[in-house]
Image (cartoon, coloured by chain):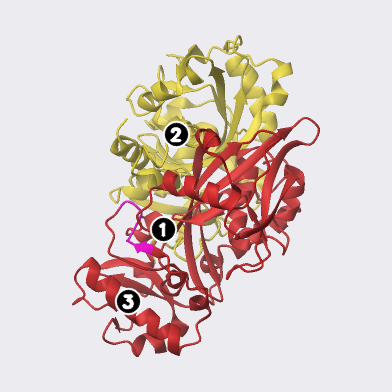
Chain colours: A yellow, B red
Amino acid sequence: MGSSDILSLAKRFNSVLFDASISVVPFMVDGHLVGLIRSRLLPLIRAATSVLCEDGTAVNLDPGLDSFEKRTDAVDALLRKWRREENLSALKGWREERYDVRPWFSSGVLFSMERAAASLFGVLQYGVNLNGFVRDAEKGLCVWIQRRSQQKPTWPGKLDNMVSGGLTSGLGVLEAMHKESWEEAGLPRDLLPSIRSAGSVSFFYESERGLFPNTEFVFDIELPREFVPTPQDGEVEEFHLYSAEELAELVCSEDFKTSSAPITLDFLIRHGVITPENNDDYLQICEMLRVPLQTLFSGGSRFLRSPALQHQ
Amino acid sequence: MGSSDILSLAKRFNSVLFDASISVVPFMVDGHLVGLIRSRLLPLIRAATSVLCEDGTAVNLDPGLDSFEKRTDAVDALLRKWRREENLSALKGWREERYDVRPWFSSGVLFSMERAAASLFGVLQYGVNLNGFVRDAEKGLCVWIQRRSQQKPTWPGKLDNMVSGGLTSGLGVLEAMHKESWEEAGLPRDLLPSIRSAGSVSFFYESERGLFPNTEFVFDIELPREFVPTPQDGEVEEFHLYSAEELAELVCSEDFKTSSAPITLDFLIRHGVITPENNDDYLQICEMLRVPLQTLFSGGSRFLRSPALQHQ
């Protein structure tokens, strides 16, 4: 891994910040900025006048939709119509899994929407991630990495962190982490108390499916040498234990899920594998693992300019 | 520690971002943004026309000063004059210690200046920090904290992390960490290999001495239970071992050095003491421990607005 490999990866998973060709419009609900919509979607938005109205500077959810239920139902009907009638790659990953939509994490929930549609509206998405590691007498620090199932709608067959999942409606952060730890890696109940909260990672990614302003809650677990993760839900093909040095190379490869790389890089930085001595771009990389999405979406501050003001 | 205590502390050590009453002007050298100057200093700046020129939107170092040596000598002469003739609280802490001035960390050095003056020009400051911790069978995770000497020019008598120091000219990051570890805590040579790089912390603070856009390289060391840190250079009054829970209270108190609190909070977050479960402001706090100073000073990007553009 050269310094510049990791920095260019970090710019790739923050393409919305660094690629000026990505044209976006704020998405407002009840006066709050809750997302960003790519301009290329505007023709479809303009045809949905009973739910969305576009005024040249922003897309607003119809203010007549003045409750959680009304907003949720109206958006759901629109999305199901788009799913039937339009060819949107985001909606091909439809999961019947609900995501809460709110201006920032600790604010009130305005409505909920199908998880696969979140990227169409560029709403803040939250996830939980568990880095499972082992201290091996010979190989030193080693990390369990999964290969995603070929059947997954997104990133099939790519390498990914041991456990990662979206934060679905109604679950607490630690509760979601426990649930995913069982489903993806078969982590038994007696190991759950060893899970340690270790910070957060945030980045602002674009793919053909839309915009991903993602904030990930990060957890670590030091595993007994004899434990082998075992997928329970068919979403994981296999697990493999890599040395931290191998992983630092692998994370920059095409084989690794781009939007999971920030969590891996954060782990390698926190555990002294990527350091100021071996990477000249260390500080820039650190910053790109925690872009200030909460501050930007909740109104910004000096130098951190709210996306709601981007046309002013 | 209530949630809101930590969030209000985090806004305090990022006052330049959150307090609109702090009026600043960009400081440019050779076309590069290298710092910010408080508007209240402008009368003094305008009197220093042979070195600095102010044009209404920025303060520029005289472009005739076109080499490292010329810039360094001219600024040094000006600062020594100010030290003799003016009553600037920043310069009362004069140390005869050089700081490199550059647009961002991995860029070329434009000149160097006395460390105490860096806050007058709001130039990016870098430091190294070591969290020394112990896993105690009874008290769990414990952390060594120093009380600063009453004789220190800044923050006398306040609580501070085990080892923290500025990154002076000519030293590498790890080299500076090793040097400070000996001087402040008497860390013996055989423990140096146990020091682990663990990330970075950045924040943008203002005090009566000026502006502090600070980026701190963070290191951890797990210490043997029997090791007791011993100051070697008279800058530390004493050391005390606190449980992580005690520290989480203490860090919010008036007794703790405000500009060292971010490093302590980062440690408590990385080690699972402050968590999404026990703090509603978790994500906002995480963000405020790593504000994107490198990106802002190197030109900004979408939504991260370079301070050089603040008057446009």
Q: Which residue is mark 2?
A: A265
Image location of residue B290, percent across then percent down: 51, 51
Q: Which residue is mark 3?
A: B75
SS for dot 3:
helix
Q: Nearer the viewer, mark 2 or mark 1?
A: 1
Q: Is residue B148 left or right of residue B130?
A: right
Examine the image and state in which quarter residue B41 appears: bottom left
Find out whether the residues at labels 2 and 3 contact each other: C-beta distance under 8 Å: no
Distance CA(mark 3)–CA(mark 1)? 17 Å
- In this figure, what is the number of numbered marks? 3
Distance CA(mark 2)–CA(mark 1)? 28 Å
Q: Chain of mark 1?
A: B
Find out whether the residues at labels 3 and 1 contact each other: C-beta distance under 8 Å: no
SS for dot 2:
helix
Q: Which residue is mark 1?
A: B168
* Amino acid at dot 1: Thr
Image location of residue B192, percent across then percent down: 51, 37
Q: Is residue A200 left or right of residue B123?
A: right
Image location of residue A187, percent across then percent down: 65, 16
Image location of residue B169, percent across then percent down: 37, 58
What are the residue bounds of the magenta stretch? B99-106
Q: Chain of mark 2?
A: A
Front residue of A172 and B158: B158
Q: Name the residue located 33 percent from the left edge and 43 percent from the top edge.
A: A280
SS for dot 1:
loop
**In the image, are marks 3 and 1 on the same chain?**
yes
